[in-house]
Image: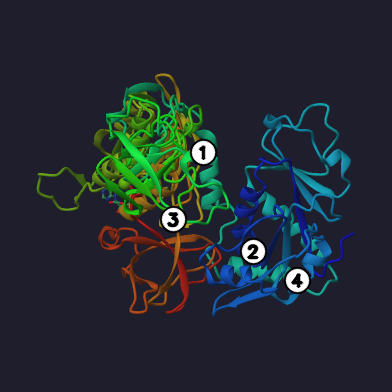
């Protein structure tokens, strides 16, 4: 067994099964149990950690054997292995300080002797590993195991990271009995009593991956003109039907010459050669003939290089006298030419299916002469507000009423993520009216979004109706703002449509839309959801938070006097304070296990730009 002062859990799976995704979901869940988690990941031999341009990279490339970068909050050491040698698990583990940690999750190091969890997706058609590996403590699977599979050591649901985290916690607790750190239990207990940790709630990542697993239906494909395709999602891969540029052309204003006229290699005389200018090749007006030795053709940038020519001499480097051209030394065959296909060779894949088309992509398609593209239809999203208190715009408020703001926020967010909004108005807290609107919504749309009426208040019918009319998936998520949230399915005109019952509070509506609805709508339109841009900024104030759920606080991000990113809180963080969303330009993301931060701490922020 691999020697380690810390409990180890390995993750074994065929590539593409989602090891890193699972480990990413497990870390906050384990952290919420009070466990300090390290990850040891085996990487490809040529992996680069820092980037060209970073000081650490420059120092390393200059030949430093070790580059140790240390700051107040974080440190890293870059070490070069002068000879490529596969890392050994025990030697790598020895670099971790057990005083800082409770557990190491190991990704890769396939053959190593440690307790492991196998990840298995029968749909990938790969063989099971546990029958051959006695150290496999469990198999986490996203579907039933085949009937003929040998009995698994333990069976877990791959889509339920919380259960997997429970399993790991129990496993290392067993490991730890009589070990140095008898506080495993204590730490977990402390996390649950001092925090908002709720063992029944799902992490945002786990919830989002469930949403994305449910939303498998893509919208239909339609063909539209490239000029109309901004922000649409390609349904088909695009290959280049022609070379770009379509012909060899000049990168400079100057003269096209034959290579044969250049002085022979080794000729250092520097004597000028004399050529005769026989014509010109201008953009859109190529030279018709074939260039012969002794001849030159005047050429402008982007114009076709004539047949027979082997280089372009810049006009600054030559002398012209009537039709005579004098070229000095220093010219090289092939210079200042843009070969046909040097941007995109004919037949190359230029854009993958699922690519959202921006201005560059529209131009790229046009450069290839592609006039029409197959894109996904925009998902039609029916939405409505619920609540007896809601008054429409244009009518004064009577006592107890508020204006319906969520419908306007939702409409804006739907348009921003490429959906077609279908506004079904505000519906009173009336069982029959809600039932009828839900049914109409599902019949007319690709997805249904509501706000309000999803808690357990007396007039909250949405969950109940969903259970009756469709299918209720879950509704507790370890995030703030955002609880409660109902997700499910409703029978539509053409199969089930996903349903998102967002909370009523206006900030919760935006936060949950951004985490769950937007990724789902992108997926329906065929685009892969990518984690949003996240940057580190210094918190200008202390931020209050209890561990146990991730918080999306509102902040104003700006550069401070030193040019560093700094974030100001918008103040009151209650979920009804919609003005905080409007004042903010970013979410300050405080992770599940965080107990808040002090002024001056680094925090992660997700800028709003381009998202909500
Ligand atoms: P509910 O989930 O229906 O209990 O609503 C929670 C809170 O959000 C209540 O204070 C509601 O008044 C408020 N709310 C619900 N719907 C809207 C809406 N469409 N616009 C503004 N506030 C709303
Ligand atoms: Mg309500």
Label of residue 33 in the image: 2
Which dot, 3 or 2, sits closer to the camera? 3
- The relative height of residue 342 versus residue 402 in the rendered view (above or below) is above
Q: Are marks 1 and 2 in contact (CB under 8 Å)?
A: no
Q: Earlier in the sequence, mark 3 or mark 2?
A: 2
Q: Secondary structure at mark 1?
A: helix
- Whether ligand 1 has any atom under 8 Å from the Cβ at mark 3 is answered as no
- Element type at marker 3? loop
Mark number displayed over residue 533:
3
Q: Would you name the residue on which mark 1 appears?
A: 212
Q: CA distance from mark 3 to mark 4?
A: 31 Å
Q: CA distance from mark 4 to mark 1?
A: 38 Å
Q: Nearer the viewer, mark 1 or mark 2?
A: 1
The label nearer to you, 1 versus 3, is 3
- Left or right of residue 421, residue 500 in this image: right
Estimate the spatial distance between the alpha carbons at disc 1 and disc 3, rounded to whole Å: 20 Å
Dot 2 lies on which element? Answer: loop
Asked if labels 1 and 4 touch by Cβ distance under 8 angstroms, the answer is: no
Q: Secondary structure at mark 4?
A: loop
| Front residue (pair 157, 599) | 599
Label annotation for residue 95 = 4
Local packing at callout 1 (Cα closer than 10 Å; few below 14, some 14-19, many 20+) is many
Residue 103 spot, x, y in % from top left: 73, 65
Question: What is the quadrant of residue 121 in the picture?
Answer: top right
Where in the figure is residue 426, as x and y percent of width and height? 24, 38
Count the labels in the image.
4
Q: Residue at x 67, y 49 (%)?
A: 163
Residue toward you, 295 or 160 = 295
- Please name the residue shown 67% across and 40% down the image: 17
Image quadrant where one finds the N terminus = bottom right
Q: Is residue 604 above or below residue 207?
A: below
Q: How is the image coloured?
A: rainbow
């Amino acid at each position: 067994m691999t020697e380690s002062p810390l409990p180890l859990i390995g993750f074994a799976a065929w590539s593409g099964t989602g090891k890193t995704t699972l480990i990413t979901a497990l870390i906050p869940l384990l952290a919420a149990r009070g466990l300090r988690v390290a990850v040891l990941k085996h990487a490809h031999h040529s992996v680069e950690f820092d980037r060209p341009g970073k000081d650490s990279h420059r120092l390393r490339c200059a030949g430093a054997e070790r580059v140790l970068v240390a700051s107040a909050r974080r440190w890293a050491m870059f070490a070069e292995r002068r000879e490529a040698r596969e890392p050994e698990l025990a030697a790598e583990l020895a670099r971790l300080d057990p005083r800082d940690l409770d557990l190491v999750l190991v990704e890769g190091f396939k053959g190593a002797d440690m307790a492991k969890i196998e990840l298995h997706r029968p749909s990938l058609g790969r063989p099971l590993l546990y029958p051959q590996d006695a150290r496999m403590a469990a198999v986490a699977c996203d579907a039933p195991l085949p009937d003929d599979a040998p009995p698994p050591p333990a069976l877990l649901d791959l889509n339920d990271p919380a259960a997997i985290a429970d399993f790991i916690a129990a496993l290392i607790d067993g490991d730890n009995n009589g070990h140095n750190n008898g506080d495993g239990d204590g730490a977990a207990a402390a996390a649950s009593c001092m925090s908002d940790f709720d063992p029944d709630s799902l992490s945002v990542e786990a919830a989002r991956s469930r949403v994305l697993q449910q939303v498998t239906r893509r919208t239909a494909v339609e063909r539209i003109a490239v000029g109309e395709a901004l922000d649409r999602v390609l349904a088909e891969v695009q290959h280049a039907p022609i070379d770009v540029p379509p012909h060899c052309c000049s990168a400079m204003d100057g003269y096209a010459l034959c290579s044969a006229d250049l002085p022979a290699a080794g000729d250092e005389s520097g004597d000028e050669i004399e050529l005769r200018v026989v014509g010109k090749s201008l953009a859109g007006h190529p030279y018709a003939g074939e260039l012969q030795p002794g001849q030159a053709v005047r050429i402008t940038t982007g114009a076709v290089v004539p047949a027979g020519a082997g280089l372009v001499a810049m006009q600054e480097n030559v002398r012209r006298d009537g039709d005579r051209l004098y070229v000095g030394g220093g010219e090289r065959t092939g210079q200042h030419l843009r070969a046909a296909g040097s941007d995109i060779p004919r037949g190359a894949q230029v854009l993958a299916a699922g690519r959202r088309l921006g201005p560059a992509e529209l131009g790229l398609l046009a450069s290839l002469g592609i006039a029409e593209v197959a894109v996904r239809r925009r998902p039609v999203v029916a939405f409505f507000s619920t609540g007896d208190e809601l008054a429409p715009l244009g009518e004064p408020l009577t006592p107890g009423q508020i204006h319906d703001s969520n419908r306007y926020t939702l409409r804006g967010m739907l348009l921003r993520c490429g959906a077609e909004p279908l506004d079904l108005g505000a519906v009173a807290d009336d069982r029959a009216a809600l039932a009828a609107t839900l049914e109409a919504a599902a019949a007319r749309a690709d997805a249904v979004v509501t706000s309000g009426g999803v808690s357990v208040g007396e007039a909250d019918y949405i969950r109940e109706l969903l259970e009756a009319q469709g299918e209720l998936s879950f509704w507790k998520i370890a995030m703030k703002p955002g609880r409660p949230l109902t997700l499910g399915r409703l029978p539509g005109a053409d199969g089930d449509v996903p349903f998102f019952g967002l909370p009523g509070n206006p900030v919760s509506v935006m936060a949950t839309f951004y985490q769950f609805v937007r990724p789902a709508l992108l997926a329906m339109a065929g685009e892969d959801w990518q984690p949003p841009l996240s940057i580190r900024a210094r918190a200008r104030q202390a931020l209050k938070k209890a561990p146990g759920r991730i918080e999306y606080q509102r902040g104003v991000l700006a550069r401070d006097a030193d040019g560093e990113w700094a974030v100001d809180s918008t103040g009151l963080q209650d979920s009804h304070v919609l003005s905080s969303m409007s004042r903010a330009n970013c979410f300050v993301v405080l992770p599940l296990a965080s107990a808040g931060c002090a002024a001056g701490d680094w925090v992660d922020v997700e800028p709003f730009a381009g998202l909500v």
